[in-house]
Every structure is written in structure tokens, then in C-alpha cells.
């Protein structure tokens, strides 16, 4: 299935969205944005969809926002107030899309087979899991346009990698390799290029088998705990666990485990 410049298919609970604009280095434009919103809504509302996987065709995962398209800042916006309103809520804004990926209680996975730059990296930082080929590299070149990453790229990078590396990527306009990205907390795992696609699908299939309620509660608890002190973070996890233990999913899985263990005695 094709939606604009996004190839969409579903396989055993995994909804795959493939950026397919290789002649433009998969630069993000309005049709891509619309397609990404469609798969995001399907992830949120369709019980048959358990995991969303974002990947790409071509040399680049994405070179970032298409500066000639509707996702680029509108030069007609001359006031800071109007610009901020468009940036947050306007057609093509990446803000709400990234926020939704973080809010949905299901896994979002991105697999970078090549360079991931600018707005594409900002979106990727919103995903739960980031896998990479050894040929991937990462950068946030917005300072060369007189700005900084403003769709969550600055704040999320600081949260993941700290101010040390945020300065390197954002202020010095330096890029990092897949290996460096893994070492600073941007990427979870790296594979050889010919293995990435299968490894990403295998990983997504493993996520499909996880208990839904536990994953959703864990995802929320991790996000909350990151912004709290130690004592309050412990309270968050206690609340999450107490809610899970009272549910049918926990009872069914605990009973099944007890029965398996009893059979081994």
C-alpha cells in the first residue's frame, strides 16, 4: 500500500511504514507527514496493530525537512507569536506527531539504514527504540540555517545524551557515526547493512509478544520517572505495578508461568 511517498504494509501485528523518496534523500514533505499521521492513528486505534516500524528506502533514512515544501517554516510568518503557533499546531508541524508517538502505549521503532538528519532525527528521538546500520550517521544542522532544532530535538537530545553531546551536534554542527550514537544513548543496537531489515523485523515481532498493559504502563512510568526525583519516581513505579497486578493480564500470565514451573518439578 502506498500513501503519498510512504509505503505502508502490515505483517503479523507489525505496521511498517517505509519512507520512499530516495531521489530526494527521503526529505520529509507534506505527503510523508500525512502518511506518518495515518499510520500513527492506526497504531493508536487498531487492536490488530501492536508495533509501528518506520524504515526507509535508499542511501539516506532521511535528510530532514524538505526546505522547499510545506513542512519548512513559512516565510510569511513575520511575528514570533504567529511562528510559534504555526510551529506547534500548523499543518505539517512535527511537534504533535512526535508527542503522539511518546503518548501511545504501544512500541514505535525506527530503523536507520543510512544518515538521519535534522527533522528526521528529531522525530526519531520520539520513538521508543532506535536501530541502526553501520552506515547510519546522525546530525542536527539547523544552526547552519540560523536556528536550532525546535521540534523537540534540542530537549530530547539533552534528555538522552546530555548537554555535552547536545553542544556537539547542535552548536558545533558535528555529526556522529552509528557507533558514537550508540555510545551516547541515541541508538540501541547496530547491525551490518544487509542484516538491518531482518533484525528490525525480528525485534518488532518480539515486541508483539509482550503483554500490552505492562508495556503501556512501563512506557508511561519511564517517561514520568525521568523527570522526578528518586522518591517520587519510586512512587510512580509502585502505582504502575499495583495497577497491573489487579488486572486480568497479570493474573493470566502469572498463572501460566506457575503452571510451567510446576511441570518442571
Image (tube, rainbow, N blue to C red):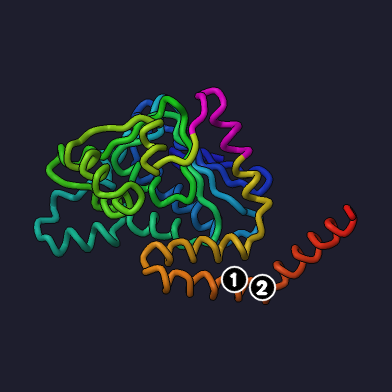
Q: Quadrant of the C terminus?
A: bottom right
Instruction: Tell which of 36 and 183 is nearer to you.
Output: 183
Task: Estimate the spatial distance between the alpha carbons at disc 2 and disc 1, rounded to whole Å.
Answer: 6 Å
Q: Residue at x 60, y 75 (%)?
A: 243
Quadrant housing the N terminus: top right
Q: Nearer the viewer, residue 189 or 195?
A: 189
72 left or right, relative to 57: left
Write the start and end of the magenta stretch as one range. Answer: 190-202
Contact, CB < 8 Å: mark 2 with mark 1? yes
Q: SS at mark 2?
A: helix
* Residue 51 in magenta stretch: no
User: Which quadrant of the figure has residue 80?
Assistant: bottom left
User: Can you give x and y, in whole percent of width and height, for residue 60 in the image?
Assistant: 39, 29
- Residue 246 position, x and y percent, is 67, 76
Up-down: is 228 above or below 48? below
Count of numbered tags: 2
- Please tell me which residue is depicted at 58% across the width and 60% down the height of the picture: 215
Circle 1: element type: helix
Q: Name the spot of residue 208 as percent of width and height, x first.
A: 65, 50
User: In the visual, does 195 lie left or right of 58?
Assistant: right
Viewer-proximal residue among 217 and 226: 226
Q: Residue at x 66, y 54 (%)?
A: 210
Residue 45 in the image, given as x and y percentages of width and height: 57, 62
Q: Which residue is mark 1?
A: 241
Q: Which residue is mark 2?
A: 245
Q: Looking at the picture, does residue 113 appear above or below residue 10?
A: above
Amino acid at each position: 500500500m502506498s500513501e503519498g511517498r510512504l509505503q505502508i504494509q502490515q505483517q503479523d501485528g507489525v505496521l511498517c511504514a517505509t519512507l520512499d523518496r530516495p531521489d530526494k534523500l527521503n526529505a520529509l514533505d507534506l505527503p510523508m507527514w500525512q502518511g506518518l499521521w495515518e499510520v500513527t492513528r492506526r497504531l493508536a486505534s487498531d487492536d490488530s496493530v501492536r508495533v509501528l516500524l518506520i524504515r526507509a528506502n535508499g542511501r539516506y533514512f532521511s535528510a530532514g525537512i524538505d526546505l522547499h515544501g510545506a513542512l519548512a517554516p513559512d516565510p510569511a510568518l513575520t511575528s514570533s507569536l504567529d511562528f510559534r503557533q504555526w510551529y506547534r499546531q500548523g499543518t505539517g508541524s512535527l511537534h504533535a506527531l512526535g508527542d503522539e508517538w511518546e503518548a501511545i502505549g504501544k512500541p514505535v521503532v525506527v530503523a536507520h539504514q543510512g544518515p538521519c538528519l535534522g527533522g528526521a532525527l528529531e522525530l526519531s528521538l520520539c520513538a521508543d527504540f532506535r536501530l541502526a546500520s553501520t552506515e547510519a550517521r546522525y546530525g542536527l544542522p539547523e544552526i547552519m540555517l540560523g536556528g536550532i532544532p525546535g521540534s523537540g530535538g534540542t530537549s530530547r537530545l539533552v534528555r538522552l545524551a546530555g548537554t555535552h553531546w547536545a553542544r556537539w551536534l547542535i552548536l558545533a554542527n558535528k555529526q556522529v557515526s552509528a557507533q558514537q550514537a550508540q555510545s551516547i544513548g541515541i541508538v540501541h543496537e547496530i547491525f551490518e547493512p544487509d542484516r538491518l531489515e531482518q533484525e528490525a523485523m525480528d525485534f518488532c515481532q518480539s515486541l508483539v509478544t509482550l503483554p500490552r498493559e505492562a508495556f503501556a504502563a512501563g512506557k508511561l512510568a519511564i517517561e514520568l520517572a525521568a523527570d522526578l526525583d528518586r522518591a517520587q519516581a519510586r512512587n510512580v513505579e509502585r502505582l504502575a505495578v499495583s495497577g497491573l497486578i489487579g488486572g486480568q493480564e497479570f493474573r493470566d500470565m502469572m498463572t501460566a508461568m506457575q503452571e510451567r514451573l510446576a511441570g518442571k518439578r
